[in-house]
Amino acid sequence: MAEVIWSGGMVVVLLLFTVFSTAISLRVGYYSESCPWAEYIVHWTVAAHANNDPTIAAGLLRMHFHDCFVQGCDASVLLDSTPSGAPVEKEGLPNKNSLRGFEVIDDAKTHLEVSCPGVVSCADVVALAARDAVFLSDGPYYDVPTGRLDGRISLASEANSNVPSPFLSADGLKAAFAKKGLSVYDLVHLSGAHTIGRAHCAVFVSRLFNFNNTGSPDPSLNSAYRNLLRATCPQSGSPNPLVSLDRGSQFRFDNSYYNNLLSNAGLLLTDQELNQDSVTKGSVHAFARDEDHFFVRFTESMIKMGKIDLKTRQNGEVRLQCNAINNSTLSEEDVSTEETIEVSTSALDTKLEESGISMTSSI
């Protein structure tokens, strides 16, 4: 009996050791020694692209949300295919023909692979790019804990079932966020990301003409705003035109989104629902009054969201290319960090100069 107990104890100890030795713990400055220029490279890559296309900031922020809500924050949304052959996340309804910013992530990863081969995960690039997108849109700067690993599974069906629909009620939104370990307050904080970006007519046109199949517009929608939207999105018109999520402030990260909700001028049903629900309404009013308070809560919830379902060393990796899982284990290379960083930043300097951005600017 003693022998059996001891044997069982050994098994437990070994199992615990395996679990803890493969677990991932995020921390600020994770790459400070292994790739000290990592965050710099991501920041200036995002800056170069945003300078040429201001709408890309919202795309990068949205990408981080959609990545974390499916399989966790593991860059699974970037994959073009997987060995299973099943349609991947980017082919799912919430992402197909609408998710943007893939070229920015690929560009940053290319520079990182020159500087620090096989070190920085694509999942961390996505998280850092989202932070920089916010900051470059006049929003808050916050430290991003890094150390994520990239996943190997990506399914369009999971994107369809996990990314919150723009047609959900407040209760539906709460349930979708709770499923990911996020609170109702995280819901209100993170919805503030809609202060930048645009939406296609297709996702809100029913509010203008035939809300819930009533044959009438959504009674909660500001009538003047409704008429303005109808000019861009007529009932029998194209579903493709784009409308700013935050009227009058689509390129600036601020609290005007919440003030629009107070005026019943939220573009999406999920936006306006926040000011109708008794639990979320108070936070909407608080953020409309105090932008700094919104910034603090938003960054807290972004960091929290960025820790959803992290991959371990058993089911994760550091991809060499963000759109494809690795085919083999990365071999070590005898590369001088100083020399590779010089090559990478030189290439980035050229891109930034072409975009008219000065390298003397401060993050």
Image (cartoon, grey):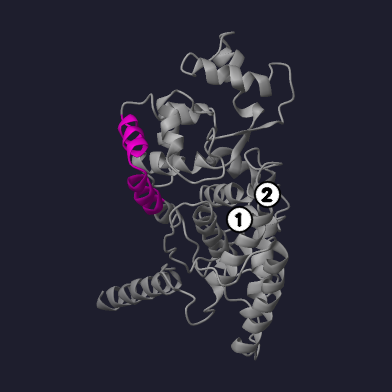
Residue shown at 49% from the left, 28% from the top: 266
Q: Is residue 157 above or below residue 138?
A: above
Q: In which quarter of the view is residue 226 placed?
A: top right
Whole-percent x, y for residue 142 in the image: 42, 60
Residue 285 is one of the magenta-drawn residues: yes
Q: Is residue 124 above or below residue 65?
A: below
Nearer to us in this view, 141 or 76: 141
Q: In this picture, which residue range is highlighted in magenta? A: 279-301
Q: Residue beneath label 1, please? A: 76
Disc 1: CA contacts within 10 A as few (<14), some (14-19) or many (>=20) = many
Residue 73 relative to residue 78: left or right: left
Q: Residue at x 68, y 63 (%)?
A: 356
Return the disc, 1 or 2, that comes first in the chain's sequence: 1
Label 2 sits on what residue type? Val
Task: Please tell me which residue lies in front, 298 or 71.
Answer: 298
The residue where tag 2 is placed is: 88
Q: Amino acid at mark 1?
A: Ser
Do the numbered discs 1 and 2 sit on residues whose CB atoms are within 8 Å? Answer: yes
Most extreme residue toward the left, as rendered?
2
Residue 247, image x and y in percent?
54, 32
Mark 2 residue crowding within 10 angstroms, few (<14) / some (14–19) / many (20+): many
